Image (tube, rainbow, N blue to C red):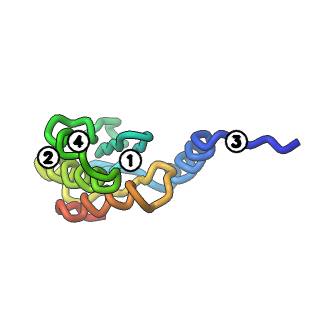
């Protein structure tokens, strides 16, 4: 009998494999993405000091109304722009992108493109 793994479990295994290579530091923090069925979240994290430097999601009051009426990928682009603004306000220009074990397409790609439009360098 073939046992199938849960999709989230396989994603978490991929994420751990990616995290062995992707590390954020003070000079170049990690831009981490989490995706749920309805929302998308992004954090800029300094792994050395274990601190979240900036965060944004589709639930943020700044973009919640704007993100409610658009496609999920467009909402991801809005979150990318918002996280870029918040990171730049803290003096962060360059980040390492952590896709969180998700495929780089759809909402994850839209968030990355939005962050690049907002001025972050990967």
For this view, does 114 lie left or right of residue 4? left
Q: Earlier in the sequence, mark 3 or mark 1?
A: 3
| Outermost residue, left side | 89
Residue on which disc 1 sits: 33
Marks 2 and 3: CB-CB under 8 Å?
A: no
Q: Mark 4 falls on what kind of element? A: strand
Q: Mark 2 falls on what kind of element? A: loop
Q: In this view, does 49 lie above or below 70?
A: above
Marks 4 and 2: CB-CB under 8 Å?
A: yes
Q: Earlier in the sequence, mark 1 or mark 2?
A: 1
Q: Which of marks 2 and 3 is nearer the N terminus?
A: 3
| x, y percent for residue 82 | 19, 49
What distance separates the C-alpha of mark 1 from that of mark 2? Answer: 19 Å
**Dot label at residue 90:** 2
What distance separates the C-alpha of mark 4 from that of mark 1? Answer: 12 Å
Residue on which disc 4 sits: 54
Crowding around mark 1 (Cα neighbors within 10 Å: few <14, some 14 to 19, many 20+) is many
């Amino acid at each position: 009998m073939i046992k199938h793994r849960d999709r989230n479990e396989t994603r978490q295994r991929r994420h751990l494999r990616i995290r062995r290579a992707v590390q954020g530091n003070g000079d170049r923090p990690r831009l981490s993405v989490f995706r749920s069925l309805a929302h998308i979240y992004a954090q800029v994290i300094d792994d050395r000091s274990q601190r979240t430097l900036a965060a944004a999601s589709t639930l943020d009051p700044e973009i919640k109304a704007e993100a409610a009426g658009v496609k999920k990928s467009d909402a991801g682009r809005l979150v990318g722009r918002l996280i870029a603004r918040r990171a730049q306000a803290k003096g962060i220009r360059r980040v390492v992108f952590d896709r969180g074990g998700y495929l780089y397409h759809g909402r994850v790609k839209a968030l990355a493109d939005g962050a690049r439009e907002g001025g972050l360098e990967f």
